[in-house]
Image (spheres, rainbow, N blue to C red):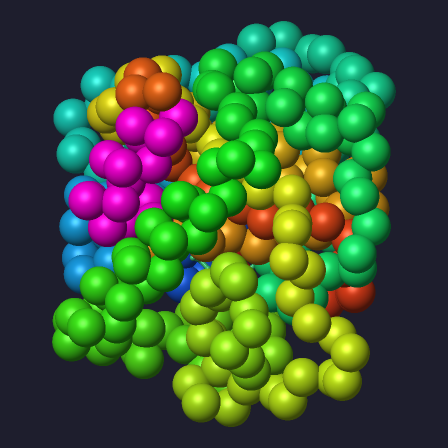
Amino acid sequence: MGDFPPALGLSAERTERVIRLAATAPSLHNRQPWRFRPLPHSIELHYDPRARLPATDPWDRELRLGCGAALLNLRLALWHEGIEPVTTLLPNLGEETALAEVRGEGRSSASPEQRTLYQAIGDRHTNRRPFRPATVPVEQRHSLIEAVTREGCWPHVVERGELGRLEDMVHRAHRVQLADPRFRAEMTRWTGQGPEASEGVPASAAGPEREPQDRWVLRDYSAGRAKQRVPGKDFEDDPLLLVVCSYHEGRAADLRAGQALQRMLLTATSHGLVASLMSQVIEVEETRQELRRLLGGSPHPRALLRVGYGSHTAPTPRLEPRELLL
Ligand SMILES: Cc1cc2nc3c(=O)[nH]c(=O)nc-3n(C[C@H](O)[C@H](O)[C@H](O)COP(=O)(O)O)c2cc1C
């Protein structure tokens, strides 16, 4: 097999490393919908139509959210390589799958903040286990909020008075999805994967068995093999819940929201925090609109997250960079 195609004046090895880091981003059901085309003067980001999940994500919004998260990683990896990335969203490349084009505008060195976020890339993993009952300090909350704002999106910290309605919405959305055989088929196909799989959510990344007292519904990714709860290790009743919202709808807004989500997740990781997503309420149209009204009617909710202090979790598998080339 030949060398990895080099891009932006980087060696083949460094280009491969940049793509590998981009691909550690989170994606719905770990479908890894991103594809890359390294070229001498740019790296193109595309999506793979085969990675669509039409029952769960019929409008490909979450597919683009995942690609936006990969785009933030790509930008951070380029800064780390001394390249100033200049990004065009939805470039006119004559291909419907093109989501972004990243060019290098001269040499630059990463800022301390970019370095911190870069260092966090490999340590960020979705954590579906109960969190410790410790409050996230105000300064850390502020930096999570700022991370979302910095990527041109709207952060919302769920307030106590909103918890009851939100909980009801999440449960309703969960029931709607479980009643849909097409949704269940997608879950089954991409869930409870064994150690040999390079796509989908491995059973080892699922949280513990659900119990009736659990207030928040985390999806069961264990394919019926959920671990029994450690006695006394219940899910926190009152977690820090954040909603990443965009100002607009549309494909570019999805990509921005993905970058904002990833910047927030990496910021959280750098503070020793962990997070998991509860996307049911965003995926079911009726509850998405209801959540939008709860937030005042103007922002478009893109991701609901639970953030806190948790135990160590292992990375989930990824495709090799070569498999991600166009
Ligand atoms: C748009 C989006 C929606 C997601 N929704 C959920 C969800 O509802 N429940 C969940 O447990 N994980 C959710 N995830 C997390 C993915 O399952 C996770 O990113 C993937 O399995 C890879 O694992 P990692 O994040 O540990 O690298 C979501 C991720 C993305 C990007």
Residue in front for this viewpoint, 230 or 29: 230
Residue at 32% x, 63% y: name it: 174
Above or below 109: residue 320: below
Residue 197 as seen in the image, left or right of residue 173? right
Q: In which image quadrant can residue 145 be found?
A: top right
Q: In which image quadrant can residue 190 be found?
A: bottom left
Give the total number of marks visible in the rendering: 0
Q: Position of residue 149 (x, y in %)?
A: 56, 17
Residue in front for this viewpoint, 321 or 177: 177
Q: Position of residue 100 (x, y in %)?
A: 37, 26
Residue in front for this viewpoint, 313 or 295: 295
Q: Position of residue 43 (x, y in %)?
A: 45, 30
- Majority SS type along the magenta span: helix
* Residue 7 visible in the shown view: no
Residue at 65% x, 43% y: name it: 240
The residue positioned farthest toward the top in the image shown: 106
Above or below 218: residue 45: above
Magenta segment includes 166: no
Per the rendered image, the range of residues in magenta is: 281-295
Q: Position of residue 82 (x, y in %)?
A: 72, 21
Q: In which image quadrant can residue 230 be found?
A: bottom right
Magenta segment includes 284: yes
Residue at 48% x, 37% y: name it: 162
Above or below 117: residue 320: below
Residue 92 as seen in the image, left or right of residue 100? left
Residue at 18% x, 61% y: name it: 55
Residue 254 as seen in the image, left or right of residue 222? left
* Residue 283 visible in the shown view: yes
Residue in front for this viewpoint, 211 or 155: 211
